[in-house]
Every structure is written in structure tokens, then in C-alpha cells.
């Protein structure tokens, strides 16, 4: 793929692997692939307070603004939005932001109204094809230029059910082979079990960490993910995984929206305990002003402001913009996310 600007993702990954003991670089991604999970609700509620949801055009406008801002390193999109913004509009050609596409959509993210799929054991599935992600067409010539993206997210949810986990691993195996042959890079998302995994006293964090290591132990370097995207299961679990292999770049996912302090404290603490990447979707999309929200996420990982200071400054900026915050400042300075309750 030919770009007029170097991509910050590639530069940061190179520095991380050159000196794994340095935590200077932190990769920030915006996950704007919610249309592959939530459908109509993906863009979020209308910002004027009227009933219903924003439109696809609204969603794409927000994506365009964030790409132009240039503070995230990765923009994760559905294949259809990637086609529009990367292939047709060429928005990433002169940007430091790397485009990426969701390469599979397992059943536990089918969060449609009235659906019960997320409450059943996850099953693997792929809507997108690598041809369409990379080239916008099927059967592209072998040497065709990549005009879409050469990076994608692949997701697995282990449930401790042999049949479904076996199928998930076989499908990931097949994906890796196809991806390596096509020169397609990926990062690996591993969710906590979405159903009771019947661990018999074992911890979900240990179950997830062991599965990550076990899954990748048989994968040679050319087939391995660039980095991981996993839930933040607390400092001990994160440090355990980071310490096992310093070249296994670990990232955390944002999860549900929560308070502003939830988001700012999460990215601060995850970085402190070894994470090198954060992928925030709903936390960015459902914020009162995503561009300002991202600016403070970046400031926190660059150690120029504390999470609490950032919440106060964020509210100050909202006031200057004439935007009413979703919560009073005192409420927004509270932790509501149970993942952060260890403090």
C-alpha cells in the first residue's frame, strides 16, 4: 500500500519491539465497527436529545473528523465503511492513521434488538472477505495495490466448550493461512467467555491468559497478530501476560461507555500495568464531544495530565463548546465500571 505519510502505528510498533522495556509509545485506536454488532443503534443516540439514533451519514462524518484530527493510530471500520472512506474517498492516503477492518463477526457481537445471540456460546463467522477489505473487489490480481486496508481485527471468544472452541480455533487457523498468503496483517481480539465457562474455581482472567498463550504458541512469527485486544481483567492478570513475553504487545478494549473517569482511569491504569494499546469504541462514540474526548485520552497516555484532572478539563471544554454534559462533574468523577473496583 502506498501512502504519502508514514503511519504512526508502524513507527510505534517498531520502537516497541526495538526496546520492549520502554513504555514511551502507546497505540490508540478508535473502534468504529459497531455497525457489525448493533445495527441501527451503532452510531449512537441523536445528539439533539430527540428519540432514535444517528444515521450512517452522521457516523461517517464523525469518523472523517477523527481521521482528520490525527490523534488515533488506528481507525477500525466495517468493510462497507472502509470501502466508502478508504477506497472511494482515499481519506487515509495522506493521514498518519492506519485503516483497519473487522475481519470476522462472531455471534456474541450480534447485539440486535430482541436478539439473544450474545447469551449463547459464541460461534465463529465471517461476513467480510479479504479481497473486499484490501481491494474492494473479488479475485483481485495477485500484484494488485491495496487500496483499502491490509490490517484487520480477528475475534475469538473461548467458552470452555470443546466443540465450539475447536471450531473457533480451526477457523482462526484457516484465516491466518489465508492472511499470510495475501500479505494481510491482523490483531487478535480475545473476549472473556460470554456464557458460564464452568471453570470449577479457576479465574476468568487465568482462563483467558492461558488461552492466549496456548493459541499463539503454535504460530510462527509471520502468522502472529501484531497485538492483542483483550478485556482489562485487573492489574495482576495484565502484568502476568505482559511479563510472559515482552514482544507480545497487549492491548485492552474499552467496553461500555460508563463515566468519563471510567474511561480515563482505564487507559491510565492499563498503560501503567503494561498495556501498549487501547481500542475504545463506545467510550468515544457516546462521549459528548469525541474529538475533545480523544484529545484527553492521548494526553493521559503521554503523562501530561491525570485522569481526574482530565475529567475536570473535559467538562471545562464542554462548557466552552456550549455542550451540556451527560452527568454533573461530581458524578462524572466517580468510578462505575466494576473492572476498576480493585482500587
Image (tube, helix red, strand yellow):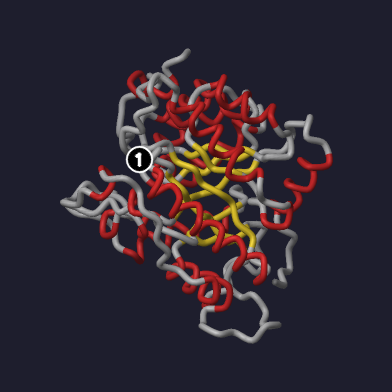
Residue 266 locus on image (x, y percent): 50, 28
In the image, 256 versus 89, the foreground residue is 256
In the image, 89 versus 143, the foreground residue is 143
In the image, 331 versus 257, the foreground residue is 257
Q: Residue at x 25, y 50 (%)?
A: 117
Residue 262: quadrant of the picture = top left
Q: Quadrant of the N terminus?
A: bottom right
Q: Residue at x 27, y 54 (%)?
A: 41
Residue 198 versus residue 11 in the image, above or below: above
Residue 319 locus on image (x, y percent): 39, 34
In the image, 24 versus 332, the foreground residue is 24
Q: Residue at x 73, y 31 (%)?
A: 23
Q: How many marks?
A: 1
Q: Residue furthest top?
A: 343
Residue 108 versus residue 223 in the image, above or below: above
Q: Is residue 222 toward the left or the right of residue 335 in the image?
A: right
Q: Residue furthest front?
A: 162
Residue 9 versus residue 185 in the image, above or below: above
Residue 152: quadrant of the picture = bottom right
Residue 173 locus on image (x, y percent): 56, 58
Q: Tag 1's secondary structure? A: loop
Residue 251: quadrant of the picture = top right
Residue 43 locus on image (x, y percent): 33, 55
Residue that mark 1 sits on: 323
Q: Is residue 179 visible?
A: yes
Q: Is residue 313 visible?
A: no
The local crowd at label 1, few if under 14, some if 14 to 19, many if 20 or more residues have their Cα within 10 Å, is few
Q: Residue at x 73, y 63 (%)?
A: 5
Amino acid at each position: 500500500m502506498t501512502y504519502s505519510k508514514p503511519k504512526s502505528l508502524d513507527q510505534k510498533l517498531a520502537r516497541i519491539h526495538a526496546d520492549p522495556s520502554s513504555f514511551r509509545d502507546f497505540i490508540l485506536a478508535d473502534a468504529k465497527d459497531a455497525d457489525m454488532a448493533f445495527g441501527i443503534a451503532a452510531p449512537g443516540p441523536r445528539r439533539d436529545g430527540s428519540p432514535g439514533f444517528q444515521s450512517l451519514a452522521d457516523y461517517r462524518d464523525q469518523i472523517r473528523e477523527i481521521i482528520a484530527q490525527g490523534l488515533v493510530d488506528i481507525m477500525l471500520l466495517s468493510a462497507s465503511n472502509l470501502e466508502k472512506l478508504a477506497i472511494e474517498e482515499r481519506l487515509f492516503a495522506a493521514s498518519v492513521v492506519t485503516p483497519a477492518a473487522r475481519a470476522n463477526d462472531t455471534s456474541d457481537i450480534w447485539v440486535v434488538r430482541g436478539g439473544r445471540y450474545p447469551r449463547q456460546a459464541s460461534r465463529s463467522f465471517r461476513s467480510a472477505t479479504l479481497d473486499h477489505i484490501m481491494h474492494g473487489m473479488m479475485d483481485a490480481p495477485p500484484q494488485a495495490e491495496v487500496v483499502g486496508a491490509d490490517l484487520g481485527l480477528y475475534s475469538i471468544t473461548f467458552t470452555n466448550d470443546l466443540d465450539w472452541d475447536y471450531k473457533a480455533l480451526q477457523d482462526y487457523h484457516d484465516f491466518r493461512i489465508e492472511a499470510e498468503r495475501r500479505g494481510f496483517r491482523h490483531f487478535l481480539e480475545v473476549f472473556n467467555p460470554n456464557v458460564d465457562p464452568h471453570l470449577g474455581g479457576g479465574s476468568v482472567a487465568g482462563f483467558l491468559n492461558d488461552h492466549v498463550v496456548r493459541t499463539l504458541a503454535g504460530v510462527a512469527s509471520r502468522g502472529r497478530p501484531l497485538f492483542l485486544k483483550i478485556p482489562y481483567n485487573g492489574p495482576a492478570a495484565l502484568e502476568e501476560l505482559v511479563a510472559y513475553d515482552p514482544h507480545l504487545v497487549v492491548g485492552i478494549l474499552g467496553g461500555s461507555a460508563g463515566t468519563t473517569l471510567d474511561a480515563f482511569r482505564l487507559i491510565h491504569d492499563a498503560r501503567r500495568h503494561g498495556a501498549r494499546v487501547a481500542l475504545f469504541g463506545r467510550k468515544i462514540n457516546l462521549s459528548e464531544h469525541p474529538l475533545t474526548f480523544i484529545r484527553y485520552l492521548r494526553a493521559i497516555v503521554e503523562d501530561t495530565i491525570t485522569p481526574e484532572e482530565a475529567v475536570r478539563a473535559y467538562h471545562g471544554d464542554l462548557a466552552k463548546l456550549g455542550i451540556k454534559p451527560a452527568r454533573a462533574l461530581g458524578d462524572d468523577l466517580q468510578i462505575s465500571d466494576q473492572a476498576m473496583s480493585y482500587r
